[in-house]
Amino acid sequence: MSQFISPLQSYSPAPPAPGKFSRSGWRTFGIAMIALALAFGLAIYSGAAAQVGAVWAAGAAAIAALGLAGWVAITIVPALARRARIPWIAMRVDYRITREGIIFLVAVFVVALAALNTGNNLLFLILGCLLALIIASGIVSRTTISGIELQLELPEHVFAGVPAPAIIELRNLKQTLPSFALTVANFNASKKGSAPAGALLARPVYFPYLPRKSSVRNHVDLLFPRRGIYRQDALALRSRFPFGFLEKTRRLPAAAEIVVFPAIQPTDTFYEVLPLLSGELESYQRGRGHDLYAIRNFVESDNARFVDWKATAKSGALKVREFAREDERRVLIALDTSVATDEKFERAVSFCACLAWHFFELESVIGFRAPQTEIPLAPAADNIFDMLRRLAAIEPTVSKPTRDFLKELAAEPDVFKIVLTSRPRGSIPTSLWTSSYIVFFDSL
């Protein structure tokens, strides 16, 4: 499933769709043409009457002609202008002169100086051609970037450090003219084309040719180095066509937002912790079962809570009770967001994401808890992406907490917990150790 974003145009309210017949519009236009033709006829009659000495008739005809023209200008022209589809006039365009443009302007200045000093008609002719070239370039390039709509298709799930395929589509709404040499980039990118922090596009996307009344799609890979929420307020449509003297930029408002999940890249520490974690979980599940499965000899990995003292006294050797395993793996991942260095906190967030994905692959029942957020226990397939979304936006707690997060976890011994914290070992509640596996930030 993909998210579609269609930015608004930079001009206000769209007029009627092009090509749609408007009876009232054509009627108004016809009235204006008839009135102007009548005014023109009265003006000609006024001139003829003045030549033959009919001063009063000439004056009356002139006043009537001016009145008709003024009536058309005041009443009909504004109505027609409101109905006209002329976004290329209203759209805002930013200009930046290029190196080629600077060279061309220097050449124009030299030719102008030589023409003024010598009075040579050929130099004036060349100067006129150069100035006309600048005007023609401005008109053509402005036409090129007008009538363009942009659609950005973003992937639904994006992980930090992993290229995410996206699609940029440009649509040319112009009826007769194509567009050339268009570039879509971040609006606030530097002149060298580098993307600012938090921008969606790492590099500009180039469209060499966009036919009239057609669309062109271009694939691009988005790469985000860190987790978080990335927003793009605007995209820039740029063009140097046809001569490259000026780079024209049109701002396209685009309220695009994408949530980048933490990287799912297990580290060596994760692989070291996983066997210990699995052993604790197996032991907890076996110990938390309700039905007695067997009584067997004690081994070093067994918990002393499950020693059967009656069987031990009868046999003279340590015996433990083994319960039937529960069918579900129920795990609550808890992240203590107490103050820690940014680097350690980011490693802890990534570790949480790896754990969540690991239990998702095992089809476990998982939940997530932090001082500022909570996701109840549910099948991992139902809440894995909600958990990753919370991890993408989570931040460390700077102020002093009003409640003890770890004590609240210790009060829930019925679910196995994996707790990540930056607190020292001596500050961990004793009762929390019996139902949890503690991972310290310093060990990551």
Image (cartoon, grey):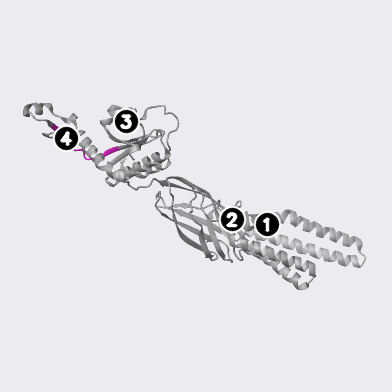
CA–CA distance in space, label 2 to label 1: 26 Å
What amino acid is labelled 2 in the image? Arg
Say which label, 4 or 3, has the lower sequence index. 4
User: Disc 4 marks which residue?
Assistant: 300
User: Disc 2 marks which residue?
Assistant: 250
CA–CA distance in space, label 4 to label 3: 23 Å
User: Disc 1 marks which residue?
Assistant: 80
What amino acid is labelled 4 in the image? Glu
Across and down, in percent, residue 423 comes to 36, 31
Q: Is residue 329 magenta?
A: yes
User: Disc 3 marks which residue?
Assistant: 425
Q: Is residue 322 above or below residue 359?
A: above
Image depth: mark 2 or mark 1 in front: 2
Say which label, 2 or 1, has the lower sequence index. 1
Say which label, 3 or 1, has the lower sequence index. 1
Q: Is residue 437 magenta?
A: no
Tell me where the magenta segment starts and ends, as one range.
320-331
CA–CA distance in space, label 2 to label 4: 72 Å
User: Residue 347 is drawn in which quadrant?
Assistant: top left
